[in-house]
Image: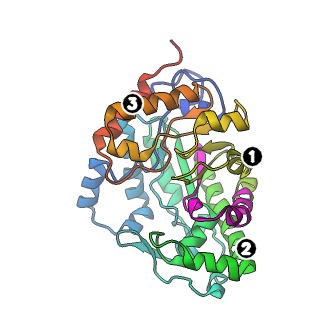
Amino acid sequence: MTMHEDGRNGESPLLVRALRGEAVERTPVWLMRQAGRTDPAYLAYREAHPLPLQDLFISAEAAAEITLLPARLGVDALIVFQDILTPLGPMGAPFRFSPEPVIERPLHVPEDLLALRPLDPATDLPHAAPLFRTVLREAAGLPVLGFAGAPLTLLAFLAEGRGFRDGIPRTRALLSDHPAIAEAVLGLLADSVASWLGHQFDCGAAAVQLFESAAFLFTPEEYRRFALPFQRRVFDALRGRGTTIHFAHFPDAAPPPRLLAAAGADVLSLPATLSIDEARAELGADTVVQGNLDNRLLASGPLDAVDAAARECLRQGGGRGHVFNLGHGLLRETPHEHVVHLVSLVRSVRWDR
């Protein structure tokens, strides 16, 4: 494998070594939603190619070009330009963006959810193989990451028909009034998500991340019954296939570290509400973590506050078993110069001096 500049001859890429829990010469960095939103090059691409967003995701050529854009910033990994909803279309729930994701035919009747069909990613998502092939060829040795939405988050999109600005009343009614149907559909989603992530490993992903983006919307009891077992089902299915990363979005209150760890992933991507020190104090000093600068701070600044928070995050990570990232994805209003500044700062901190 061709090494990028911070690799050493004969060794795996920096990010891969960090994900294995090894001590590294500097902490690797990539950012959730790094391809898109805040990047002027992405905005220029969208202006020149005004395709519907959902069509960009399934165009191997377009998705590869966008995936590669952040490489120029100095990040240590590329994450494929896709959406957590990507598998839902071929399963029977096509979606569009206007501008937020909207399910074309919301599955408001519980029995409609049972009509979803299992995903066969090699057949249903044929763009994935050429997408990974192109990115891996052009990425100059950078690891490429895959991802998917977690089952309960996908179920919430299906039931609500759109994002969660107005809460999840239909999802909550489904869980309380028809729990057996909900669990059957969550099982189907878990198996389909595992197949999709496994296919991404087959296509060359160095690691894959599961996004429980709607985690904060559920009660602890709902989360333990309807999220956790199906996260675990996904990660169990992927055991031995490659490195897995678990992310659950808790923007306002820190989740119990053991609740995150119970999903069974290799790496925990921590929300900004839970410090690395707190997570490792409960789970053990060798816990491999990702994160976790507050994305809201990066958006608002000032940069001296961003610098202080980033350095504290790096200090807690300690140069072993830590990948620098945000506590959630880049916000649309984040100035691009803040992103450039952050990546440069993280890259400047060395552990081998």
Q: Nearer the viewer, residue 317 or 49?
A: 317
Res 200 quadrant in image = bottom right
* Mark 2, other Cα within 10 Å: few <14 / some 14–19 / many ≥20: some
Q: Is residue 167 above or below residue 109?
A: above
Residue underneath mark 2: 183
Disc 2 marks a residue whose amino acid type is Glu
Q: Which quadrant is home to the N terminus?
A: top right
Q: Nearer the viewer, residue 306 or 230?
A: 306
Residue located 53% across and 15% down the image? 352
Q: Position of residue 144 (x, y in %)?
A: 52, 44
Disc 1 marks a residue whose amino acid type is Gly
Among numbered discs 2 and 3, the one appearing first in the sequence: 2
Q: How is the image coloured?
A: rainbow
Whole-number angstrom distance, CA of label 3 to CA of label 1:
37 Å
Among numbered discs 1 and 2, the one appearing first in the sequence: 2
Residue located 54% across and 59% down the image? 213
Q: Position of residue 314 (x, y in %)?
A: 51, 28
Residue most extreme to the front: 253
Residue underneath mark 1: 240
* Mark 1, other Cα within 10 Å: few <14 / some 14–19 / many ≥20: few
Q: Position of residue 186 (x, y in %)?
A: 68, 70
Whole-number angstrom distance, CA of label 2 to CA of label 3:
44 Å
Part of the protein shown in magenta:
205-232
> Which tag is nearer the camera, tag 3 or tag 1?
3
Residue 204 visible in rendering: yes
* Label disc, if present, on residue 307 of the rendered structure: 3
Q: How many marks?
A: 3
